[in-house]
Image (cartoon, rainbow, N blue to C red):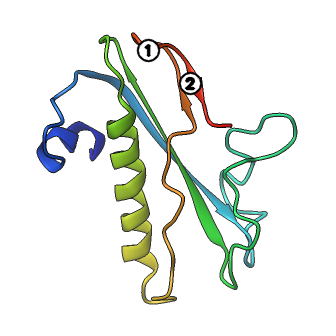
Amino acid sequence: MASKRTADLIPLCHNIPIGGVSVDVEVVGGEGADEAAGAEDVGKENGSNPWRREEPGPFGGVVITARVHTFGQTGVEMEALTAASIAGLTVYDMCKAVDKGMIMEAVRVVLKEGGRSGDWRER
């Protein structure tokens, strides 16, 4: 929902027809994280997950991955960043009774494919 409202939230972003959105939330660290649904590595490549923080904290943490697709000739990085950010704020809202000291960090683009400027991958 957040990715489709990006143009309403961010000045000078234009409305883009979105073909698909997925938001995945992975539980890391803490008690019961191994048994949690979706605990396999998100974006696992070459045996490591570059998005996983080394020390998730005493209660564990979550890794949120947003993927946005369009058939247009423009990028949807802002839509993916908005989706991931709002998902993080949603997790905070749901968990603030347990830990008000949660930290939301490292919101970034890690992969972009297609479009006029071509493919890009975080190094």
Q: Is residue 75 above or below residue 24?
A: above
Q: Residue at x 74, y 71 (%)?
A: 29
Q: Residue at x 69, y 73 (%)?
A: 56
Around disc 1, counting alpha carbons within 10 Å, would you say few (fewer than 14), some (14 to 19), or many (20 or more)? few
Q: CA distance from mark 2 to mark 1?
A: 9 Å
The label number, if any, that marks residue 97 in the structure image: none
Around disc 2, counting alpha carbons within 10 Å, would you say few (fewer than 14), some (14 to 19), or many (20 or more)? few
Q: Residue at x 43, y 62 (%)?
A: 88
> Horizontal and vertical percent for residue 93?
36, 75
- What residue type is disc 1 on? Ser
Is residue 96 left or right of 40 when viewed as pictured?
Answer: left
- What residue type is disc 2 on? Trp
Per the image, the residue denoted by label 2 is 120
Q: In the depicted view, which residue is nearer to us: 86 or 10?
A: 10
Per the image, the residue denoted by label 1 is 117
> Horizontal and vertical percent for residue 3?
29, 40
- Picture quarter containing residue 15? top left
Q: Is residue 18 above or below residue 47?
A: above
Is residue 18 left or right of 80 when viewed as pictured?
Answer: left
Q: Residue at x 51, y 80 (%)?
A: 102
> Horizontal and vertical percent for residue 1?
27, 44
Q: Is residue 69 above or below residue 85?
A: above
Element at badge 2?
A: strand
Q: Is residue 26 above or below residue 19?
A: below
Q: In the depicted view, which residue is nearer to us: 15 or 62?
A: 15
Q: Are marks 2 and 1 in contact (CB under 8 Å)?
A: yes
Is residue 6 left or right of 105 when viewed as pictured?
Answer: left
